[in-house]
Image: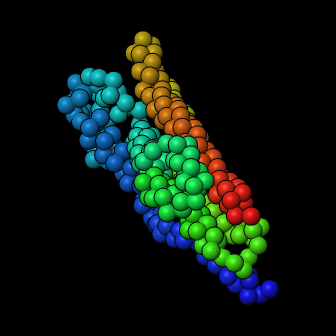
Amino acid sequence: MAETTATVKPTTSVQAKKSSNIISLLAPVLCVIAGYFIWRLVLGNPANFGVPNVPGDEGWFWPGRHDPKSALSKMYLGGIIVPILIGTFLTMLTFVIERFMTISKANGTGNNADFIRKVQYQLANKNVDAALAECDKQKGSVGNVMKAGLHRYKEMISNTELSTDQKVMAIQKEVEEATSLELPMLEKNLVFLSTIASLATLIGLLGTVVGMIRAFGTLGSDSGGSASAQALSVGISEALYNTALGIGTSAFAIMFYNIFTTKIDGITYGIDESGFTLTQTFASLYK
């Protein structure tokens, strides 16, 4: 009985994908740095403001600016939280592009439902090599899992030591092992989008609160009635740019997160269907 068990290889024909998460960890830091330079050099360009620097506005890290000429230059006046929000938006955009490329590749070159029907047709005619050729054409996660299962399927056809139930279990185990290697790559980095969806709004509100504190502080130190009211309204307007940036980034992150999870669910369904196809076909043809 021990010899019979040994004929079933414990390894899968699909090799684990080696990938480093260092880039994923560096991306948010680099995006925040890029956000600062966009805020400082683009939005804060002196040409975007009508009043030259006044005494006390000097400094490179966060120089003062007055009389903005456009809405984008007004965003600069939202304060030091703005570059963090810009960096958060760039981080979201980076992982959206990365997930789009990865999931598009995982979808394969054709429709997964059509691919599974073609494999079913080839297996019904006991043409495993043609089914493997279909996997090479399809590629993607479903194609990879199906190919791994087909290699074990082909091996089990010529195996005379195992019962039909044991052969089906061997095929099923191969599919499960191949699936366990594919799914982590599909779900990788989605946590960044879900985190940004929650965090961006909070950072935006923090920027708004800080801006409001500054605005009311200016109001309290200025005794002029109409001038103080005008300064307060301008300060509130500038502070609300933080809220707008945070909510906008959060909305995009939620939207793309839901799109990607829906696509992953579709791929997962195709993987499950491919495993069911292999086991049921083998059980019916090789009793």
Q: Could you tell whether 33 is left or right of 22 in the image? A: left
Q: Nearer the viewer, residue 250 or 13?
A: 13
Above or below 192: residue 160: below
Q: Is residue 59 visible?
A: yes
Q: Percent from the top left, x then y, of residue 71?
A: 33, 23
Residue drawn 69% across and 78% down?
A: 160
Q: Is residue 201 left or right of residue 230?
A: right
Quarter holding residue 4? bottom right
Residue situated in front as seen by the camera: 57 or 181:
181
Which residue is painted at 30% across and 46% down in the image?
37
Which quarter of the rendered picture does the N terminus lie within? bottom right
Q: Is residue 213 above or below residue 62?
A: above
Please name whichever residue, 167 or 40, is drawn nearer the observer in this view of the structure: 167
x then y, percent, for residue 150: 57, 63
- Of 226 and 274, nearer the camera is 274
Q: Residue at x 41, y 16 (%)?
A: 230
Q: In the displayed structure, would residue 259 be above or below residue 161?
A: above
Q: Name the residue rendered at 35%, 46% in the picture.
A: 36
